[in-house]
Image (spheres, rainbow, N blue to C red):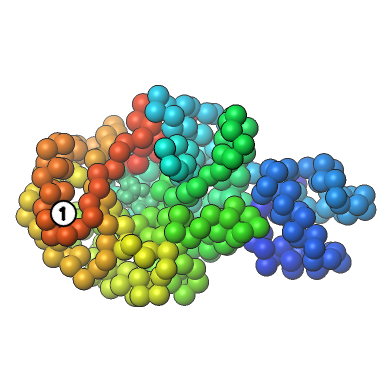
Amino acid sequence: MINKINLLDLDKQQMYRFFLSIGEKQFRVNQIMNWIYKYYCNDFNKMTNLNLSLKKKLNDIACIYSPKFLKEQISLDGTIKWSVEIGNKLIETIYIPEKKRSTICVSSQIGCVLKCKFCSTGYQGFNGNLSISEIIGQIWNASRIIKNKSSKKNTSITNIVFMGMGEPLLNIKNLIPALKIITDSSCFNISKRRVTVSTSGIVSGLKILRNTIDVNLAISLHASNDKIRNLIMPINKKYSIESILSEVRKYLKTSKANHGGVTIEYVMLKNINDSLNNAKELAVLLKNIPSKINLIPWNHFIGTNYKSSSYNTIINFSKILKKQGFITTIRKNRGEDIKAACGQLVGKM
Ligand code: SAH
Ligand code: SF4
């Protein structure tokens, strides 16, 4: 398998090139993609509209291989967390069902190099980037499992968020083809408005993204000034708040996916970034940026002294932002009982 081409690594253009290179007609691409992404078939022998010689050829040089889902945990609220085997390491993929949508939260890296002080993934250290098929394979496996579990016919995944382990923009080489596969109508066919890349603000990556693909952006701001952000997110010393926001402004100018504004994520840390002055400062900071603010109650993990702001503090913080005209929401924690919530993903079973 190691030397075979994994078709989950190829976006449509690459798939065309691959079929051309093996002397096959272009219409085969649509047939194969249909089998892979509509019927979740990973066995060439079962693809009934391929002739015998093509089946043999594909078996010799290609495969459809997704990473193994080792363990499944189901939360009381219906959230599902899978531990996913990547080499001898584990990552996590989450499924979050809601009334009107169902979301898969994918990982982009094994661990994370950025070491944000409030994030357990950051504490775990960094063990490498995920390949395209390791990213796509998470969605492929999860969608297939959900489809099989459900009695209803149309149980499709409506949203994808890159909010699992890792910093997606530090794996931009694989992120971009993965985004193409996710949004391609022959593949997962998910609208760019429903695909969210959450980033700690890697400006160089945002620039590349702006020139390549339009998706929904969520910026992990988490502070109303550089002093606080430097303290909790070491990457801020390289990319300051202003440098991030200035790049976000540029992204928004051409983006259709972010037509309601960019999402600003703000994790509420007791006595760190949650004063009423911080709320006012944040409102000034975002004055010229169409944005929706998502306040995130901080999820505890062992090994830090941080505490989440109280519910009252979060409500008062949100009131100030709302008064200033910002759409402000408070993130519901999902799957807390199985440690599937934001910042709790550490790759342990
Ligand atoms: N690396 C990317 C995406 C993964 S983290 C990023 O930082 O944006 C997804 C979201 O969870 C980010 O907004 C992150 O800051 C937040 N988060 C991290 N640790 C958390 C914790 N312990 N409690 C709540 N949110 C957390
Ligand atoms: Fe990495 Fe995001 Fe966690 Fe920061 S919050 S350590 S960028 S995964």
* Quarter occupied by residue 216: bottom left
User: Callout 1 environment at 10 Å: few (<14), some (14 to 19), or many (20+)?
Assistant: some
Q: Position of residue 26 (x, y in %)?
A: 79, 66
Q: Residue furthest right?
A: 53
Q: Nearer the viewer, residue 73 or 260?
A: 260
Q: Position of residue 275 (x, y in %)?
A: 8, 49
* Count of numbered tags: 1
* Helix, strand or loop at mark 1: helix
Does 97 sit left or right of 308 as displayed?
A: right
* Residue at image coords 35%, 71%: 252
* Residue at image coords 14%, 42%: 315
Does residue 300 sit above or below 287 in this rendering? above
Residue 101 visible from this viewpoint: yes
Does 12 sit left or right of 336 as displayed?
A: right
Q: Position of residue 123 (x, y in %)?
A: 34, 43
Does residue 4 sit above or below 169 in this rendering? above
> What's the amino acid at mark 1?
Lys
Q: Nearer the viewer, residue 137 or 119?
A: 137
- Residue wearing tag 1: 322
Q: Is mark 1 within 8 Å of ligand 1?
A: no
Residue 138 visible from this viewpoint: no
* Quarter occupied by residue 264: bottom left
* Quarter occupied by residue 338: top left
Q: Nearer the viewer, residue 41 or 73?
A: 41
Q: Position of residue 334 (x, y in %)?
A: 36, 35
* Residue at image coords 85%, 64%: 24
* Residue at image coords 58%, 55%: 189
